[in-house]
Image: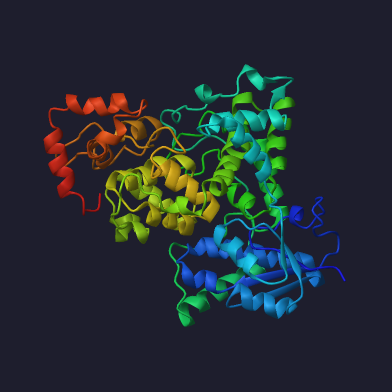
Amino acid sequence: MTTPHWIFGDQLGPHFLTPAGDDGPGRGTPVVMIEARSVFRRRRFHRAKAHLVLSAMRHRAAELGGRVTYVRAETYREGLRRAVGGAPVTVCHPTSYAALRLVRSLSGVRVLPARGFLVAREEFAGWAGERGGRLLHEDFYRWVRREHDLLMEGDHPAGGRFDHDHANREPPPGGARRLDVPGPYRPREDDIDAEVRDDLDRWEREEGVRFVGRDGPRRFPATRREALSALRRFVRHRLASFGPYEDAVLAGDPVMSHSLLSSSLNLGLLHPAECVEGAERAWRQGAIPVNSAEGFVRQVAGWREYVWQLYWHFGEDYRHVNALGHTEELPDYFAELDADAVTARCLATVLAQVRDTGWTHHIPRLMVLGSHALQRGWDPVAVTDWFHRCFVDGYDWVMVPNVVGMSQYADGGRMTTKPYTSGGAYLHRMSDLCGGCAYRPTERTGPRACPYTAGYWAFLHRHRRLLSGNARMRRAVQGLDRLGDLDEVLRQERRRAGEVP
């Protein structure tokens, strides 16, 4: 008899059910899927995220038809017992340490290599072993480009350089409220979505399961067919303008030219190879400029792969590092996504986007949400958990390196070369979020003092000893000595520490 194959809710694409030289599942292999209620009891997820994951799982089960045994249970252990008894099953390497411990603790479960990524774990280990020191993203990205022949012309990168950041850091067009590009793909809800919404309502009403944020209508693909449609629309109509404005922010256009494919990739509905190959093909056909193709390839084949590998390379204890000693609890307005309680327009706007959709693009995540948490000294474990729960594309492997290492600099520079935080001047230059705000990005003290500008200097002062040894931060730290009002800034920020900005 063919051994059944168990797929998790982030392993939903066809590449998790095809032979790959590891004696894994093949055509016609029986499939097991388990919807474990305990996942939603343990953590307070964004309602839109819970809806998307359950919708995607149930849609996949409907596609597989009689081939799948779909069990709704309280725990994975109970579900697997009900699905196969004690019979053996295979499963692709899960995407978190907790899930890996679980499958290894179950008798009869054989763990196959991970799928859904460009670089195998052993390949990364070989690359890392040759580095001898820091595992810099730029070095990794160039290695992946060469190894996979992505955007290469022989031995040379397309456009003569690996890095097109010089062309991909434009502020938003002056006076524009939205980018002049076609909107992203939008799925249509169906009976499965209605069933999911009814179940979530019932869980909240009768079973004490709690969510945060708003749900609906569903904005992100829940099927392979929807995900491919979203990819095609992005490449054909939106990728050309993605590069220049990938770091820009407009209050009235939270999506800009971003792909919105991260949730589809992280659910396993898309494979990264088909995404980057689609972008390269469009460039070679002359449909998009090289800087836009490179910016997207960098996100998918560079950063996403890098984060996946570092999650496993750094080990499970990495999530608990706290080099800056930050221990403050997340305030209620942040934990509850209470955007209406916030005065600072940038933070209120971005919190509202997360509340309403479970998504915002990488610059608001890093330079509004993450920067604020860093400046306020919030516990990085709590910040990581918040990002994991509140974003539709948030998973443990995604958020631990991104938040602990990059956003909160909690590893002291093991992953990135500097803390990613700034005063209000950066947000003023790269967005329209400062217009109409009660605060002024140029003011450090007084009733109109920008929380980010004042918070930036207070952060530098608090960690002066550590950051003065960082070559990329030395000049900024020296700037503290030129502030005639530093004492006043510090007194003000101590007073405002417990206030809603």
In the displayed structure, 114 sits above or below 442; it is: below
Residue 427 visible in image: yes
Question: Residue drawn at (70%, 48%), measured in percent from left and top?
Answer: 229
Q: In which quarter of the image is residue 119?
A: top right
* Color theme of the render: rainbow
Counting from the top left corner in percent of width and height, residue 48 is at: 52, 61
Farthest-out residue, right: 1
Q: Quadrant of residue 151?
A: top right
Farthest-out residue, top: 160
What is the tally of numbered marks visible in this picture?
A: 0
Question: Residue drawn at (51%, 46%), measured in percent from left and top?
Answer: 314
Counting from the top left corner in percent of width and height, residue 325 is at: 30, 48
* Camera-side residue of 137 and 221: 137
In the displayed structure, 369 sits above or below 335; it is: above
Question: Residue drawn at (31%, 58%), measured in percent from left and top?
Answer: 333
Counting from the top left corner in percent of width and height, residue 68 is at: 77, 70
Q: In which quarter of the image is residue 150?
A: top right
* Camera-side residue of 12 and 237: 12
Question: Residue drawn at (27%, 37%), measured in percent from left and top?
Answer: 456
Residue 195 visible in image: no
Counting from the top left corner in percent of width and height, residue 65 is at: 79, 70
In the displayed structure, 159 sits above or below 397; it is: above
Give the quadrant of the N terminus: bottom right
Horizontal placement of 333 versus 307: left or right? Answer: left
Horizontal placement of 62 versus 29: left or right? Answer: left
